[in-house]
Image (cartoon, grey):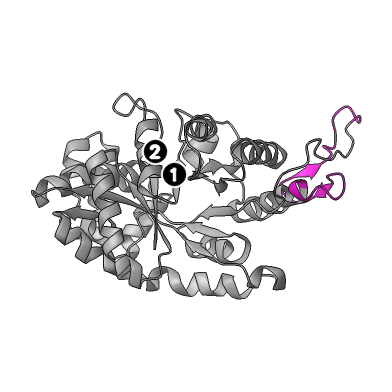
Amino acid sequence: MKLGLNIGFLTSANPDPVPLAVEAERLGYDSVWTAEAWGSDAVSLIAWVGAKTERIGLGTAILQIPSRTPALTAMTAATLDRLSHERLLLGLGVSGPQVIEGWHGIPYGKPLTRTREAIAIIRHVLRREEPLKWDGETYRIPYEGGTGLGKPLKLMMAPVRHDIPIYLAAIGPKNVALAGELADGWLPVFYSPYHRESFQEALERGLKKRTPERQSLDFDVAPSVQVAIGDDLERCRNAVKPMLALYIGGMGAKGKNFYNNLACRYGYEAEAETIQDLYLEGRKREAIAAVPDALVDQVALCGPEARVADRLQAWKEAGVTTLICVLHDVDALRTMAAIRERL
């Protein structure tokens, strides 16, 4: 099992994560990943990291598919891959209606259709075999109804790799199946190795639909996992709870929160409802306190080094091939590298 590092995005508490990425490379981490919501963007930060490193894989977890045209995403991928000497791992996802419609001003539409078409267009552009034409439900290229001057174009710069690995963020069954079918890797968040059955049937259904040329390719299961290492188990759990409360409680409206739905699938229906009610009422501290310790232990690695090492086995046995550590502490970064060496 490989290790990755998710440095997230820039915040006042995390203004310069590059030194952590440099240390991860020195320790032998396989990849470093950046994120975006409605603050710093993933592309600028991963390019900055790429300029300061030499070998480590550079992942986006994730680029919001609706916020960029597929052609622009392909241009960005080709550029980053060339500048980084073939280190890019292109992580994509549809985000959610609150961000896409509330921040970007774009209809959320049909996420599965949009994802399928976007991946197909990106690969078409990167193959660079013929000018881009697309007549789909979400995208129509060239655009119809404008000046009438649009014409099919082909990427000016020849990509170093036409098969840049594409990862798909997914937690819902249909989207997980789509990841298995179309992507080179899967980026689940709040993945629980103790509830592998929540995902496995959908993932296997998708893997069976892969085209013959993709059947022989390795598929990377790469969850982002919060890591908090220390002797005080309660303190470590409490370090993880704010993120869980934010996503379960605040990342989506009532009835349209994918992360809340996931907690329910894990058997925490009542707790998820309480967390969401408190969070949406503005009672964030109470929402954080309502996150059960048991749920934290399902989806995160917390506590003393020996406990983390013991619980890490569950992720390995569940078929995780890259464990992307969400942490901002250099000591925890080094401890995870040491634990991985002993596995």
Q: Position of residue 270 (x, y in %)?
A: 23, 58
The answer to which of marks 1 and 2 sits earlier in the sequence is 2
Left of 44 or right of it: where is 4? left
Q: Which residue is mark 1?
A: 32
Dividing the image into 4 quarters, which one contains the C terminus?
bottom left
Count all numbered tags in the image, as a single digit.
Answer: 2
Q: Which residues are magenta?
A: 125-149
Left of 177 or right of it: where is 18? left
* Residue under the point 26% across and 36% down: 281
Relative to the observer, which residue lies in front, 310 or 204? 310
Q: Secondary structure at mark 2?
A: helix
Left of 278 or right of it: where is 116? right
Q: Which residue is mark 2?
A: 21
Q: Position of residue 268 (x, y in %)?
A: 25, 61
Task: Tell me, yes or no, whether the two marked residues, 1 and 2, touch with CB atoms within 8 Å.
Answer: yes
Q: Position of residue 129 (x, y in %)?
A: 85, 50
Give amino acid for label 2. Answer: Ala
Q: Secondary structure at mark 1?
A: strand
Q: Quadrant of residue 295?
A: bottom left
Dividing the image into 4 quarters, which one contains the N terminus?
bottom left
Q: Say if the magenta span includes residue 135.
A: yes
Q: Position of residue 287 (x, y in %)?
A: 21, 43
Specify whether residue 252 is in view: no
Give amino acid for label 1. Answer: Val
Estimate how packed mark 2 is, as few (under 14), some (14 to 19) or many (20 or more) residues with alpha carbons within 10 Å. Answer: many
Relative to the observer, which residue lies in front, 309 or 27? 27
Q: Say if the magenta span includes residue 124.
A: no
Q: Give the alpha-carbon distance from disc 1 to disc 2, as whole Å.
A: 6 Å
**Would you place residue 45 above or below residue 321 in this image?**
above
